[in-house]
Amino acid sequence: PAHSCAATPSLPHDRQPRGVRAHGLLRPPQERAAAPLLAAPPPPHPVARRLAAATGVPRYPLSGLPAAMARPLLLIVSALASLGASSGQQADEGQFFRCEGCLQGTTMRVMFMDWSTAVVNEAARDKAKQLGIEYSCDDPQLAVPECFQADLWNGGWVGALFYDIIGRLGVDIIPLTRANFTAESFEVYKGGSSYTRCVWEVVQENVDICVGDFWETDERRNIVAFTSAMRQDVFKLTTKEVGSTSFSANDLFNIFRPFSAGVWATIVATIVLAGVCLWFIERGKQGGSFILGDDGNKLHAPEGMALGVWMAMQRYLRAGQAPNVTCWGSRLVLFGFAVLVYISVSSYTANLAKQLVTGSSTVGLVSSFADLIRGGKRLCVLESVAGLFSKTKGINLVPYDDYFASFEGLYNENCEAAAVGTSEYKIHIAGGQGSGNVCVDESDPNVGQSSCANPDAPPGAVKTIKNGMWMGKPTCECSSPGVTPSSCPEDCPDHHKYCKLFEINSDEDTELWNYQVNFAIPLNPQYENYFSSWIVYFSLQGQIAEHYSNWVLGRAPSVCAAKSEAGEGQLDLKSQAGVFFFSNLFIIIGMLIHFLEMYLEKRRREHQTASRALSDDSDDSADLKQGTESTGVAKALQRMEERLDSQQRILELLLRLQAPPAAIPGVTRLPPYSPMSPQPYSLPDPKSSIQAPLGGSPPPFAAPIAVLGFAGSTEFPRPGSRPPQRPEVPGSAR
């Protein structure tokens, strides 16, 4: 092929050809006539013969449910039957499908679908870089000789897998690319998918096998054979961001969303049942947890049941220890409850984590797939998988021939949502990588698709979307040196523009949105079992998953915000609002209950003190009225002495504060007690008993001292001493 530095600006992008329609390089008839004939199919495996005879299904089925069920069984049986052979042993041709060197001498025409993560030719890229030209093995004007060397197509998660399988089978390869599409394929297929066109090349026997990340759709499976599935591609429902929601009271209840109301009601009922059963079995048993209450008294029904429910709730929340049980009945109750805790808590944790991360506050054109169907809104899909979505009633499809065309259609709101494969979502939307073409000529019938129908379209009719890095280099550069594309929107207006797109995760779509398709390889039916057996083997060995991780997951780090993809975001304060609200709510309620208990306890103590004082006064009156009993008199006198003693200390303190120390008498002696005296408890004259300070007037409280009197002793002692006890006297001598 010719090399030109003045190449068209189209860049390799998603699953479609770049300039192939205008520059299709057709093999001359003599070259196709000289191509090796297809090898004769080998004899079937003995296990396959027995399986076909027992089930009545064909060996090379193309469609139908029985065939779809029999083929995986046949491949697994074949793979297991060949496990006994050593790695260095080569089986005879036809003995085992998973064989090494059994197809030596067979020449296959293999079309490699160049795609940066699936099928890669690193040597051809390096050669184009060395020549200073744009890399493209699909454009005849840009393809370098390294594009047509079979042993150089060993990169990508699909390319690395088939490089190993082809080497083990010993097949000779004639490498082809999209530049080798034939005129026949354009006659039978008018669509724009280069992958579907390669399928038709296999049907027309121009190609033996197409190597790439092909979708095994019903339409394709009906016309060509496919290998066993390499892995599954799960479609993501994607929409465009148009705003964000503000915080509302409903956000507080997000933590309860993982379970429905019925599930929560059943969990609460089970907690109550387990707590009541534990109390009923263990009540009053020594060594158990249901003997005494908080007040030290025996537990009764209401408090015991409440304690059992509390323990069950603590165990469910994993915040407390298991209660002490003494019999097998209680142990079985705890075991059954533990099963509930293990399953429900694990399920809740997984669902809550997913919903809190993916439950974004971003508002899109649609909120769910159900919303899209109810509103009669449009879904952008690739035309190669339109049949998968057309089976859903009420859905309006907008088909596109290329992923970047569908991205642009969603971005321009020509549709409200788009179906995007997992790999493409991670690379182009979340990863911000890649580049693609879109026809923007409004007069062209293919407007919005990856290329215009008019070959003489004016310059600028096809717009190149430069999303970000692609094949190790930026697709757009700023005019100012040293400036990143994100800092020069005037030079790179499309840089990471698809970060405005995000995945929809809605509870309504749990069963509605479940679209996925297998990655498989279209090929000539006579080679199907050979390649399928090796695919099953490498899948069981984990090598396919390893290739996918290295070439897809490891090369597309997310550059967009957390809303862009489930599982890569951080939990924000809004998503955790319910956790903090209910946690602090119970803490505050607990503190309020504690303060209420303190207040009630204080009131109870005051009431008890007042009641005790009233009881003492009543006792004094009763004792005085019933003075004929000497014990009552003694008790009454004792209480009176205690109160007078307290009053005596108070008055002495007042004396010290109002008078100089020298003016305070040490002891005031009273007349001795005499039972025959008419005034046995008389006090001396206040003015003579207490000297006035400095010869002046007596203290103002001298009269109160005389009025109060000291009927419990003949002396007025100093502070700290206690008056002597008076002997008991009969009540009549008071």
Image (tube, rainbow, N blue to C red):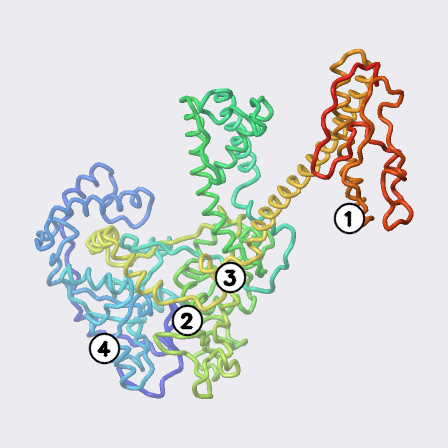
- According to the picture, the residue beneath numbered tag 3 turns out to be 563
Query: According to the image, label 1 marks what residue?
Result: 661
Choose mark 2 or mark 1, whichever is in front: 1
Residue 269 image offset from top left, x and y in percent: 55, 31
Q: Residues within 10 Å of mark 2 (few under 14, many from 20)?
A: many
**Distance from Cα at disc 2 to Cα at disc 4:** 25 Å
Please indicate whether residue 394 sits to the left or right of residue 596 in the image: left
Q: Marks 3/2: CA distance? A: 17 Å
Residue type at mark 1 is: Pro
Which residue has dot 2 on it?
433
Q: Vertically, is 691 above or below 31?
A: above
Q: Secondary structure at mark 1?
A: helix
Tell me which amino acid carries mark 2: Gln
Q: Which mark is residue 146?
A: 4
Is the Cβ of the residue at disc 2 closer than 8 Å to that at disc 4?
no
The reply to whether the C-beta atoms of the residues labelled 3 and 1 are less than 8 Å apart is no
Give the foreground label among 3 and 2: 3
Q: Quadrant of residue 107?
A: bottom left
> Is 379 on the left or on the right of 115, as rendered?
right
The first of marks 3 and 2 along the sequence is 2
Q: Nearer the viewer, residue 46 or 197?
A: 46
Across and down, in percent, residue 479 comes to 46, 88
Q: Amino acid at mark 3?
A: Lys
> Between disc 3 and disc 1, whose residue precedes?
3
The tag earlier along the polypeptide, 2 or 1, is: 2
